[in-house]
Image: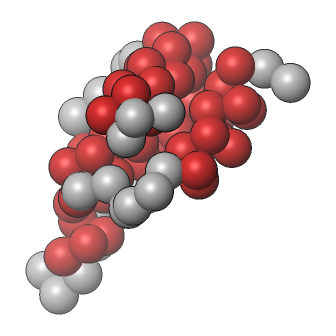
Amino acid sequence: MSAFEQAQKDVNTLSSKPGNADLLDLYKFFKQATAGDVSGDRPGMMNITGRLKYDAWAAIKGMSKADAEAAYIAKVQALLKADGK
């Protein structure tokens, strides 16, 4: 199992759900690592969550798969440390 796969499992062991900013970070790094650059149209005004996710992912356009995986792993480790794990 890769460190990236392990981090995906570890994030589910947190005692509480991370805040919205942390969730957006996890989302954007995961999507960049697994799907590459953002694609498709930006969600409409009524889809606030969709727009936030799209914008977060679009902000790291061009980041390599390896860098996105490393950033995701670092984010999960920071969350685990803050959680006392």
Q: Which one is nearer the viewer's eye here, 9 or 68?
A: 9
- For residue 82, side relative to residue 73 (left or right): left
Q: Which one is nearer the viewer's eye here, 82 or 53?
A: 82
Residue at the (39%, 61%) spot, across then down: 16
Residue lying at the far right of the rendered structure = 1
Query: Coloring scheme of the render?
Result: secondary structure
Q: Which one is nearer the viewer's eye here, 65 or 42?
A: 65
Can residue 81 be seen from the camera position used here?
Answer: yes
- For residue 20, side relative to residue 82 (left or right): left
Q: Which one is nearer the viewer's eye here, 82 or 51?
A: 82
Relative vertical location of residue 23 with respect to residue 62 in this rendering, above or below: below
Relative vertical location of residue 60 with respect to residue 30 in this rendering, above or below: above
Residue lying at the far bottom of the rendered structure = 46
Name the image quarter holding residue 74. top left
Image coordinates of residue 2 in percent, x first then y, are 78, 20
Residue lying at the far front of the rendered structure = 84
Count of picture labels: 0
Image coordinates of residue 84 in percent, x first then y, are 40, 35
Relative vertical location of residue 79 with respect to residue 67 in this rendering, above or below: below
Residue at the (62%, 32%) spot, across then down: 7
The N terminus sits in image quarter: top right
- For residue 75, side relative to residue 33 (left or right): left
Image coordinates of residue 35 in percent, x first then y, are 60, 40
Residue at the (54%, 45%) spot, across then down: 11
Residue at the (73%, 32%) spot, across then down: 5
Image coordinates of residue 49 in percent, x first then y, are 26, 72
Can residue 79 be seen from the camera position used here?
Answer: no
Name the image quarter holding residue 10. top right
